[in-house]
Image (tube, rainbow, N blue to C red):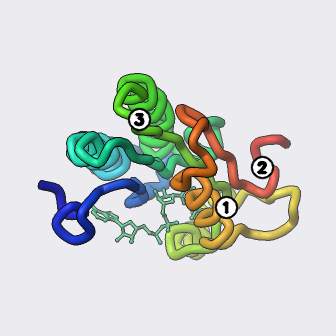
Amino acid sequence: MALGERQYGNLDILVNNAGIARRHYIEDTSEEEWDEVMAVNAKGTFLGTKHAIPAMRRAGGGSIVNISSVSGIVAIGWSAYNASKGATRVFTKITAVQHAKDKIRCNSVHPGPIDTPMLREGRADPATRDASTPQAPLGRLGTSEDVAYGVLFLASDEASYVTGAELVIDGGVVAE
Ligand SMILES: NC(=O)c1ccc[n+]([C@@H]2O[C@H](COP(=O)([O-])OP(=O)(O)OC[C@H]3O[C@@H](n4cnc5c(N)ncnc54)[C@H](O)[C@@H]3O)[C@@H](O)[C@H]2O)c1
């Protein structure tokens, strides 16, 4: 029995949100750093999904939302972080395809620059400041709420025909 079932009766929604950023170019990325980023961002998403699926099946279906990044679509960012977010993006699609029969939907969200501790940490470091903050055509940083409303939609029954999709919430960064 999964935690959500013990607390709420059913597990209907999983958001794989936990993530870390390490800001190094390929040549400066150690194996340990690569493994650390992949462990949290990619393997964490796999493990959350793996253990939620049986509970969602028991519930008759569910919605999984994976937090990827614009760095999972285009080359904004670094090395291990981009690879981990690209892995999350495609893992989302195989989850959607393998578990459509279980009425489990799975979609990815791709935030651009969002004003959180992760982004502030990158901006505070002069070595990474510029590359950490792509300028969005909408002219401001995103907020946690901007991302949360997208997650809310994908988690809800209003998105009942949406699976394997990518929702970009980036103020226009990728479009440019
Ligand atoms: N802030 C941005 O600009 C931005 C852009 C694109 C994607 N994202 C993604 O959004 C998600 C949320 O990031 P955020 O911006 O709120 O950053 P954040 O650093 O403020 O929050 C990250 C959260 O992940 C948790 N976490 C990290 N490692 C963990 C672990 N091993 N086990 C459990 N929890 C762990 C932290 O405790 C923290 O609550 C991440 O996946 C991040 O990659 C953020």
x then y, percent, for residue 42: 35, 42
**Vertical placement of 163 versus 55: above or below?**
above
Q: Quadrant of the N terminus?
A: bottom left
Q: Mark 2 — residue? A: 173
| Lower position in the chain sequence, tag 1 or tag 2 | 1
Counting every numbered tag in the picture gives: 3
Q: Quadrant of the C terminus?
A: top right
| Lower position in the chain sequence, tag 2 or tag 3 | 3
x then y, percent, for residue 147: 62, 63
Quadrant location of ligand 1? bottom left
Q: CA distance from mark 1 to mark 2?
A: 9 Å
For the point 29% across and 48% down, the residue is: 59
Q: Amino acid at mark 3?
A: Lys
41 sits to left or right of 127: left
Q: Nearer the viewer, residue 31 or 94?
A: 94
Q: Mark 1 — residue? A: 113
**Vertical placement of 140 versus 85: above or below?**
below
**Residues marked 1 and 2 touching at CB (< 8 Å):** yes
Instruction: Mark 1 and ligand 1: say if the CB distance to the nearest ligand atom is below 8 Å.
Output: yes
